Image (spheres, rainbow, N blue to C red):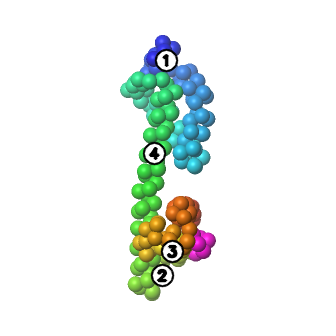
Amino acid sequence: MKPEEKILISEINNRNRHVFEMLFQEYYLPLVKFAEGILFDADDSKDIVQNLFVHLWENAKDIEINTSIKGYLFQATRNRCLNRIKSLRIEDNRNILYLEGVLNSEVLDPEMDSGETGRIMDALGSLPDKMREIFKMKYLENQRQKEIADILGITENTVKTQLLRAKKKLRDILY
């Protein structure tokens, strides 16, 4: 590690405001662009990088940087992005299970008509026809992506893409 890096790390540990401002100015935009390349979401990317700098400031005395500051910031951003993706998958799975439950219960009990069920049905109805069909085959009929691709005569990649887009649209509409 270069001597300048050691001095900067020491200043970070001492919570030198000037050094933090300099680091923020130098790395904020490149880190946001890096995060966007992983998340494909500008707002989440900005939040992750801002939270990283807040964490760095609040925990400055306990932060150990054994590589370069740049390496540390990019690695920390990458890890936070991966954690965000993991939490989105968990959240999506919960939402899909909830959606399945509502849809299945409506089939079992046609008299059940809550506002939430109507919202979900409207959201599903707003999906393009093919996307809705793929979504239902996957989550209501429990078919594998390969099976769906074979039945519809499309590639597995198309199935994956349509499912991701359907989840995003449903998330945007419902939440």
Which residue appears at 56% of the width and 21% of the height? 18
Q: Spatial distance from mark 4 to mark 1, Cα to Cα? A: 27 Å
According to the picture, the residue beneath numbered tag 4 turns out to be 82
For label 1, the SS is: helix
Instruction: Give the residues drawn in magenta, as a range.
Output: 124-131
Vertical side of 61 occupied by 7: above or below? above
Which is closer to the viewer, label 4 or label 2?
A: 4
Which residue appears at 51% of the width and 63% of the height? 156
Vertical side of 54 occupied by 171: above or below? below
According to the picture, the residue beneath numbered tag 2 turns out to be 113
Left or right of 114, for residue 30: right
Which is closer to the viewer, label 1 or label 2?
A: 1
Judging depth in this view, the residue of 79 and 158 nearest the camera is 158
For label 2, the SS is: loop
According to the picture, the residue beneath numbered tag 1 turns out to be 5
According to the picture, the residue beneath numbered tag 3 turns out to be 151
Which residue appears at 48% of the width and 44% of the height? 81
Q: Spatial distance from mark 1 to mark 3, Cα to Cα? A: 58 Å
Judge whether residue 151 is colored magenta.
no
Q: Amino acid at mark 1?
A: Glu
Left or right of 86, for residue 134: right
Label 4 or label 1, whichever comes before in sequence order: 1
Label 3 or label 2, whichever comes before in sequence order: 2
Which residue appears at 44% of the width and 56% of the height? 89
Q: Amino acid at mark 4?
A: Leu
Label 4 or label 2, whichever comes before in sequence order: 4
Quarter of image, res 93: bottom left
